Image: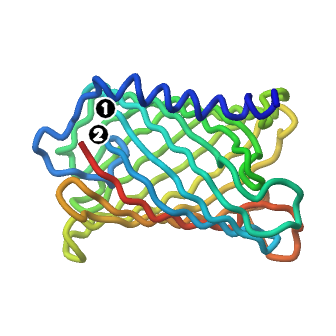
Amino acid sequence: MKSRIIRIIPYLFTVVLIVVMASNFKTALAGEEIDPSDPTKVYSYAGGGVKYNDYTNGEHMTELRATGNFALSKSDMAMFEFGYGWHSGDKIEGSNSGFTNARLRWFHLFDMDYSVLKGYRGWATQVDLQFAGELKGTDGQNTVSIGALPAFGISEDWSTFIALNLVNSWDKKFEKYNGVGISIAPLLVYSPDYLWEGAYFQIWPNYTYFIGGELEGEGSGNLDITTGGPVTEIIMWSVAFQQNFDVDLKTYRRGEDTGIKNDWNVFFNITRYF
């Protein structure tokens, strides 16, 4: 019972955070066109969608996820995300339904010049907490990341962002410290309006290498590809595909690993901006 309460704490904290901030959060829209492709833009929004997760042992999970973001000022915002899923398969012991992993992030934007088409625009910083879930396949670890996100313009349609983070890892009960690592995640954004109005594509590889603790010398990575656009002026859609990689940066091959590692997943999301 105590273990269950500990695992529910992140979700209760998220609910409290939403209630506290919902009464006084500030919108950053001010009549301007929404640009969901730029991770440094400060907005308030709420959304949700369906996520499908495929595992290396042949099993899978279907998940409902809620997302939200609160613009606390013109330069600060707080984001949350959590889900509830249904697992298909009994090769691993455990419940086949329950809360999945959750995320809380505080983001601060320093001076940013969005008029720069080529060159350095500015940078942001963040503290990112990701909590293990209850459901098998999502209960791996808790992480706390602290890092920076400089932004650069390449052309009118292309931008890039270089996310650099220091990552600390604990087990799902916060009882054991796993180690500290360095994460690099260069994001490339393409916004071609000629395909459809408000179209964008994000290509976001991420690699984390651990430099201390029990995980020292190990690494893992993933590749995210996202596309989206507007339904209306304030409602957006997006589809995100993620492929995970092992410590040698080779894609997981079915049959070589009998564990319940996430091979790939796809997430369809609808978001309403305020």
Label 1 with label 2: CB-CB less than 8 Å = yes
In three-dimensional space, the C-alpha distance between marks 1 and 2, rounded to whole angstroms, equals 5 Å
Please name the residue that numbered disc 1 is placed on. 71
Residue name at image x 29 percent, y 59 percent: 236
Image quadrant containing the C terminus:
top left
On screen, residue 101 above or below 244:
above
Of 13 and 160, nearer the camera is 13
On screen, residue 9 above or below 252:
above
Q: Identify the element where label 1 is drawn.
A: strand
Report x, y in % for residue 208: 67, 46
Q: Residues within 10 Å of mark 2 (few under 14, many from 20)?
A: many
Q: Identify the element where label 2 is drawn.
A: loop
Residue name at image x 60 percent, y 66 percent: 265
Seen as rendered, the residue at the extreme left is 31
User: What type is the residue that disc 1 sits on?
Assistant: Ala
On screen, residue 41 above or below 87:
above
Please name the residue that numbered disc 2 is placed on. 43
User: What type is the residue that disc 2 sits on?
Assistant: Tyr
In the rendered image, is residue 151 in sight? yes
- Compared across the picture, whether 147 is left or right of 272 comes to right
Give the total number of marks visible in the rendering.
2
Of 263 and 113, nearer the camera is 263
Of 242 and 63, nearer the camera is 63
On screen, residue 222 above or below 69:
below
Report x, y in % for residue 251: 72, 70
In the rendered image, is residue 212 in sight? no
Which mark is on residue 209? Answer: none
- Compared across the picture, whether 145 is left or right of 15 comes to right
Residue name at image x 13 percent, y 38 percent: 30
Which badge, 1 or 2, is on the more N-terminal residue? 2
